[in-house]
Image (cartoon, rainbow, N blue to C red):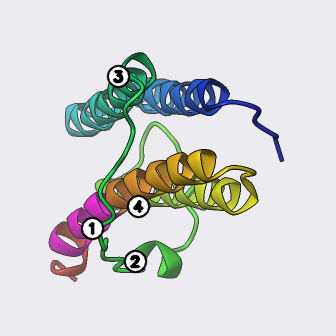
Amino acid sequence: MKEFKSIDEILDFAINAEQEAVDFYTDLAENANNKEMEKIFKQFAKEEMGHKSRIMNIKETGSYKAPKEEISDLKIADYTVDVVPTSNMRYDEALVVAMKKEKAAFKLYNDLANRAHSEEMKELFFSLAQEESKHKLRFEVEYDEYVMREN
């Protein structure tokens, strides 16, 4: 696992990860074979752009203290089967991909926080993990409301 020597390295890593998510969802939108899925993927990409913007703002201002808050975990991502992203995914499959990507990002930042050498780095990683947890919850709520209730 990558070792970080500064807060700027952490933030650059997080900015790059968010850009990869933007690119991922943008590619899915461009290859979607129906307008509804294209719209959904574009919305996901837009949300990831917002996350990237937030991290860039943290880097510019030097302010990254996030209030500690309890974030619910519906654990839906834990009980769904993996989905291979394709251009003809259904909405429920796209939500599963999004949940699992956010869960992986949360786990990465949480693991990095546990390995951090300074309290400042640890706090920043936990803050980034918390943000990813919020993203995952958003997709889980969406899945619960629009997929599970229909079944």
User: Which class describes the residues within 10 Å of circle 4: few (<14), some (14-19), or many (20+)?
Assistant: many
Closer to the chain start, of discs 3 and 4, is 3
Q: Which residue is mark 4?
A: 133
What's under tag 3, amino acid-wise?
A: Asn
Answer left or right for 63 relative to 7: left
According to the picture, the residue beneath numbered tag 3 turns out to be 57
> Does residue 78 show up magenta in the picture?
no
Helix, strand or loop at label 2? It is: helix
Helix, strand, or loop for circle 3? helix
Q: Residue at x 81, y 40 (%)?
A: 2
CA–CA distance between discs 1 and 4? 15 Å
In the image, what residue type sits under mark 1?
Tyr
Residue 36: where, in percent of width, then height? 20, 38
Who comes first in sequence, dot 1 or dot 4?
4
Part of the protein shown in magenta: 137-145
Measure the C-alpha gap from mark 3 to mark 4: 20 Å
Tell me where residue 102 appears, x and y as whole percent: 47, 54
Instruction: Give the number of the mark in front: 2 or 3.
Output: 3
Label annotation for residue 76: 2
The residue that mark 1 highlights is 143
Q: Nearer the viewer, mark 3 or mark 4?
A: 3
Q: Earlier in the sequence, mark 1 or mark 3?
A: 3
